[in-house]
Image (cartoon, rainbow, N blue to C red):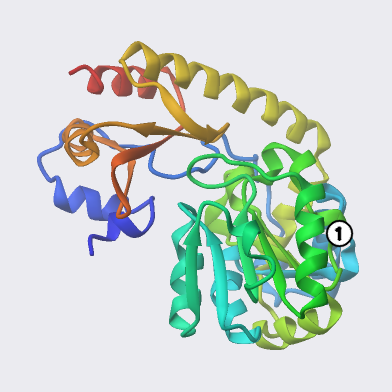
Amino acid sequence: MNKDLIHGGALDVMQRNFPNTDAPWIDLSTGINPWAYPMGEVSAEAATHLPTRDLMETCRAAMARAVNGPEDALVLSPGSELLIRLLPTLLTAERVAILSPSYGDHRMSWRQANCQVLETTTPLDEACTADVIVVCNPNNPDGRTFSPDVLEDIRCRLAKRGGWLIVDEAYADLDPSLSMAHNGGKEGLIVLRSFGKFYGLAGLRLGGAFVPEALRTRLEQVLGMWPVSGPALEIATRAYSDRAWQINTRECLAKARHRLDGLLMDSGHNPVGGTDLFRLLEVEQATKLWMHLADAGVYVRRFEWSNQHLRIGLPADPVAEGRLAFALIP
């Protein structure tokens, strides 16, 4: 399988596959904020010493406050991706219902654990039969959302049977009202959080999960003594504590999404879904348009599950907007 079909961000692969593209590449293949949180100075201690327990606890407290979740239910990890891959090895499950289409690593990880995976547009309807239900809220790539009240009802039904509801909230920083983090620690609930998307610092590799106490203990044993780097902990603590930046960024991203929608519609492409960090297009020949854009040095996300959909992230500046608009001209 082509690596670009698995994830966005494979710019090195694109550069090799399209060597004749002269203009600097514009990477719109990820749903990452192009205006990252200003990292500022990183202390020498954070970079040269092993991460201390105090540094870890300070970051954990800041993250919990920022997302309105209980600190004692939160496990920090080097990105939420690792948690997605670990959970099938720690939970007992035979039948897993996963929202589809959605983030592909959920499906892959449960299949590798030899579970029966049901991909469905209505995973919550499987609360009586599935051992695990997985949803992304908001969903990637179509932006579909679920009410926390509805999800809490599903959690209760699953927990009574010893089942689990996994809610991937990688993009929930865009709309905190969607989050289930306040229910973190309840039986049968796992809430995954990602730092890199909203804060634009995916390279720092930081994520977290709100889980019941027994699962937290097992995760911490697997993750080890120093799962997150000192610089990541220090920077994330500042970012999670910067309420003004968070509010301003939500407003800026909403405006940027509105501009992108206008650009896309002016080119004859009406978005059919997405969030304030990416838009989903439905087109007749997605691969053909994807290659046309790549030839112009514009890298967007295509999918193995559909030749009628592309996902486009936010251009970082007017130059990138202009190049995207020009590349979309038939």
Q: Nearer the viewer, residue 118 or 329?
A: 118
**Left or right of 1, for residue 116:** right
* Residue 249 spot, x, y in % from top left: 68, 30
State which quadrant residue 290 falls in.
top left
Residue 40 at least partly seen: no
Residue 207 at least partly seen: yes
Q: Residue at x 62, y 24 (%)?
A: 254
Could you tell me which quadrant the N terminus lies in? bottom left
Q: For numbered disc 1, what is the local secondary structure?
A: helix
**Left or right of 134, for residue 182:** right
State which quadrant residue 266 falls in.
top left
* Residue 80 spot, x, y in % from top left: 60, 64
Q: Is residue 45 above or below residue 278?
A: below
Disc 1 target residue: 183
Q: Is residue 172 above or below residue 124?
A: above
Total number of numbered labels?
A: 1
* Residue 252 spot, x, y in % from top left: 63, 24
Q: Is residue 303 above or below residue 248?
A: below
Q: Residue at x 56, y 77 (%)?
A: 95
Q: Is residue 118 above or below residue 178?
A: below
Label 1: few (<14), some (14–19) or many (≥20) C-alpha neighbours in 10 Å: some
**Left or right of 317, for residue 15:** left
Residue furthest to the left = 20
* Residue 218 spot, x, y in % from top left: 74, 86
Q: Nearer the viewer, residue 130 or 228?
A: 130
Amino acid type of disc 1? Asn
**Left or right of 258, for residue 150:** right
Could you tell me which quadrant the C terminus lies in? top left
Q: Residue at x 45, y 77 (%)?
A: 111
Q: Nearer the viewer, residue 220 or 258?
A: 258
